[in-house]
Amino acid sequence: MKLTLRIWRQSDREARGKMVSYKLDDVSADMSFLEVLDVLNEQLTTAGEEPVAFDHDCREGICGACGMVINGVAHGPQKLTTACQLHMRHFKDGDTIDVEPWRARAFPVVKDLVVDRGAFDKIIQAGGYISAPTGSAPDAHATPVPKPAADAAFEAAACIGCGACVAACPNGSAMLFTAAKVAHLGALPQGQPERASRAAAMLHAHDEADFGGCTNAGECTAVCPKGIPLTVIGSLNHDILGSTIRGR
Amino acid sequence: MTYPGEFFVDGDPIADTKAPDGPLAERWTKRRSTGRLVNPANRRRLDVIVVGSGLAGGSAAATLGELGYRVRCYCYQDSPRRAHSIAAQGGINAAKNYRNDGDSVERLFHDTIKGGDFRSRESNVYRLAEVSVEIIDQCVAQGVPFAREYGGLLDTRSFGGAQVSRTFYARGQTGQQLLLGAYQALERQVNAGTVQMHTRHEMLDLIVVDGRARGIVVRDLETGAVTVDLADAVVLASGGYGNVFHLSTNAKGCNVTASWRAHRKGALFANPAFTQIHPTCIPVSGDHQSKLTLMSESLRNDGRVWVPSSAGDTRSPADIPEDERDYFLERRYPAYGNLVPRDIASRATKAVCDDGRGVGPGGRGVYLDFADALQRLGRPAIEERYGNLFEMYERITGDDPYVTPMRIYPAVHYTMGGLWVDYDLSSTIPGLFVIGEANFSDHGANRLGASALMQGLADGYFVLPNTIGAYLADGPFQKLTPKHPDVAAARSGVTDRVQKLLSIDGDRSVDSFHRELGKIMWEYCGMERTDAGLRKAIELIRSLRDEFWTRVKVPGTGAELNQSLERAGRVADFFELAELMCIDALHRGESCGGHFRAESQTPDGEAMRQDDEFSYVAAWEFASPPVLHKEHLTFEYETPSQRSYS
Ligand SMILES: Cc1cc2nc3c(=O)[nH]c(=O)nc-3n(C[C@H](O)[C@H](O)[C@H](O)COP(=O)(O)OP(=O)(O)OC[C@H]3O[C@@H](n4cnc5c(N)ncnc54)[C@H](O)[C@@H]3O)c2cc1C
Ligand code: SF4
Ligand code: FES
């Protein structure tokens, strides 16, 4: 099929960017969206132009590196799918497709479609862990974990840290990301000792990093490629409440 | 037969692997209880660089930080959580024997040595099996959400090459969950101030001063700035080099640069030809293909592999009656069936396709069929076990595996070769340690499924943090500045090379070269290797490399985020590695594990080892031509036998 891509080009953090149109003549339905960008970049390189910069690594929907707004939707039109796993069979011959970087105050554009998501690491640094130094662990079967708790922890832990939730949120909030980690660790017996302080510290880091507040718009979960549910935000709020009652 | 002189020269054998002596089962305890220690106050004055934040690097950096060393950790991605370990699907082995099915440290040791076709070191493998049990404890304590049974205890499953159920898993995302555990431990140390994390930085050279590894040259991938970082020891945890084949299951950025630069500085590179071709990957769909996707080996627990019995049968799978199907793994290997080791399953798959019985476009594919399992266990159970893998398959191919069998074909997956290390995980350059997939270590000529995660975490959490102490006990070493002539020379070497790549200004993209190199490697150094083919490959690689250095086009400048430049540097190193791989494959005239030389097979087409001549690790020294140092393998506890899985 033939496609027109309109892609955000911006040479560095300070530069002003703009949308630029490119035509592609020979796109097959079996290609992934990133393979289309590869083909375009090959074309640009041989023509002596600068290829489009974009983050990617695993191309299996698990590393969370790729991320772009495709036709106004973070990761594009297919539900529960990262940009690297989006295949061209979901587009039609003659389509014009807009491709833009995540746009959020806390995620400055670095170049073209590449943004700086370092703020996510800062949120984890603030408390997104269980303090269990190497060598200190009891036998793994010392504490059985009820299957429902283990499953709930797993569901929340599936977050890949891609940032689509932030890009989709009208407030640029990272509440879904933050709450997913709080819910993961809070569901497990091992996570109980630090539960209240963890939630408060992570929320504090979230606000410090210039992410906006959550107004329950629900756009985040709609674009999340891993289907992290809004209910995790409820469990974050519950833990925060716990921490205010007990004092930090 | 190749003889030294043509492509390489013989050097001195490696005399000592530094393993403690005494009974196998006591060696690790002995090393730990007699190794020299660094007192806590001194650790604060010792700098350690860790290159890589995958399972190996992430766990090592976190643990060294907890011990109080001053750690700086590097990765090329924008966050340490994105290291390629994140993509591991199936699981992690441990000899817990929670199932009471006869597992033990000894059995895991035995399976690993045998799985590796008797080309690994007994002392190291035994330690790996021993430490495996602690890994599971550690990960559970960190909150890794492993699969559990209704009673709340951990669930396990079987993987290829084993008759016990010792593989722990977190749905099809085990690597992700283990890596997030290590990542969180790492970020906790960042918060504590013991670890500094440098993302989007690439190591482009190793700094060696007075015979010791003392630092690295790195390029800031966003600004292009080239700087040096100096330390008392350097740990490479930079992963495997499967991407030399261009198409592999590895993440796009996986590369050999860190290891190769260290090799050029004197670290021996061991068994480069030992690569693993994984039997169950989604077949190539066209020329645009940028990577291959693995379908986890765990699927072989419940999926049955088959092809039509007769060549040229193009009926749809549902129309082929049971008695016209050939379940070729079950037929050839009744004892292990679909769960034979990877090298064996891959070759058997290639054989039926070469026979004209392959299915799908180009006839390069076989069915992996879940119909029986769906009938026996019901759809919910299959969804619970493999749901995300089935979804991924459907997303990529457009076919629904609950209805039509999957089509799979082998693809490059893992590299057993890597920098040579001794028992302490030290390379041949003092102060340079190598862990995880980057070293050659424990898997011999073939790695068993679910053992890479085990090895990465064993190295990073438990082995290296212990063994590095004995080296650092002599530190801190002489203070260095960036002005030191050896340091300055390493840095200008890097800037010159960057300039050179930018200045060629030719007419071919980096990717076009990478693709072509990959095709050469897959054709001649892939699943089946021959003397003539390897000689041809060496010639082709050399001439393509020359062409690269005169025709490559790298747009943009060195002073910005320039992804073409990053790839150009990696592909340039792949060219050099590719040649060494072919030389290694050529010199090893036997078949063993994943290394199949057509000239050395049994009458029924199985790999035939030649222990009299080749029971050694081939450790290569960088020189022109390369110098071969042999580490002879001795088996005190296992008796090398022809592997049999039938
Ligand atoms: C699809 C897939 C599925 C797998 N499934 C399993 C499984 O189920 N069980 C199992 O046991 N094994 C599995 N494996 C193998 C296993 O995942 C890997 O062998 C293992 O994760 C490697 O870990 P590592 O820490 O050594 O390296 P990696 O995780 O590859 O990490 C390498 C790190 O080094 C950094 N790096 C590399 N080069 C440089 C440089 N020059 N400068 C700076 N940083 C650099 C990277 O940024 C990264 O942080 C699988 C592999 C694949 C490809
Ligand atoms: S919550 Fe979903 S959208 Fe947000 S970072 Fe995690 S995976 Fe991405
Ligand atoms: S490239 Fe890893 S999630 Fe898309």
Image (tube, coloured by chain):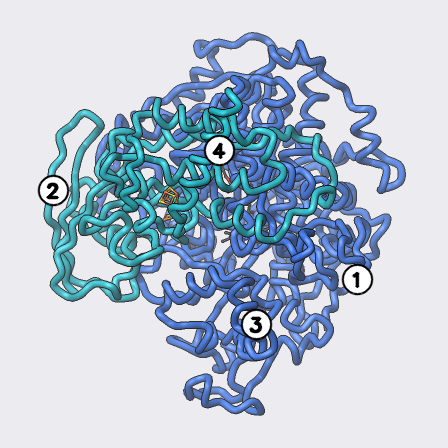
The cyan chain is A
User: Which chain does tag 4 point to?
Assistant: A
Q: Which disc number belongs to residue B303?
A: 3
Amino acid type, callout 4: Asp
Whether marks 2 and 1 lie on the same chain:
no
Distance from disc 2 to disc 3, alpha carbons, whole Å, reads: 48 Å
| Residue assigned mark 1 | B641
Residue B75 picture quarter: top left
| Residue assigned mark 2 | A19
Q: Nearer the viewer, residue A175 or A73?
A: A175
Q: Is A247 rendered above or below residue A232?
A: above
Distance from disc 4 to disc 3, alpha carbons, whole Å, reads: 43 Å
Measuring from the top left, give residue B333's x and y in whole percent: 69, 74
Q: Is residue A14 visible?
A: yes
Q: Which of B636 and B410 is in front in this view?
A: B410
Measuring from the top left, give residue A93's x and y in whole percent: 15, 66
User: Which chain does tag 2 point to?
Assistant: A
Q: Nearer the viewer, residue B497 or B103?
A: B103
Amino acid type, callout 1: Ser
The blue chain is B
Q: Residue at x 16, y 41 (%)?
A: A8
Measuring from the top left, give residue B373's x and y in whole percent: 58, 75
Q: Helix, strand, or loop for circle 2? A: strand
Q: Which residue is drawn at 59% across and 9% down?
A: B478
| Residue assigned mark 4 | A239
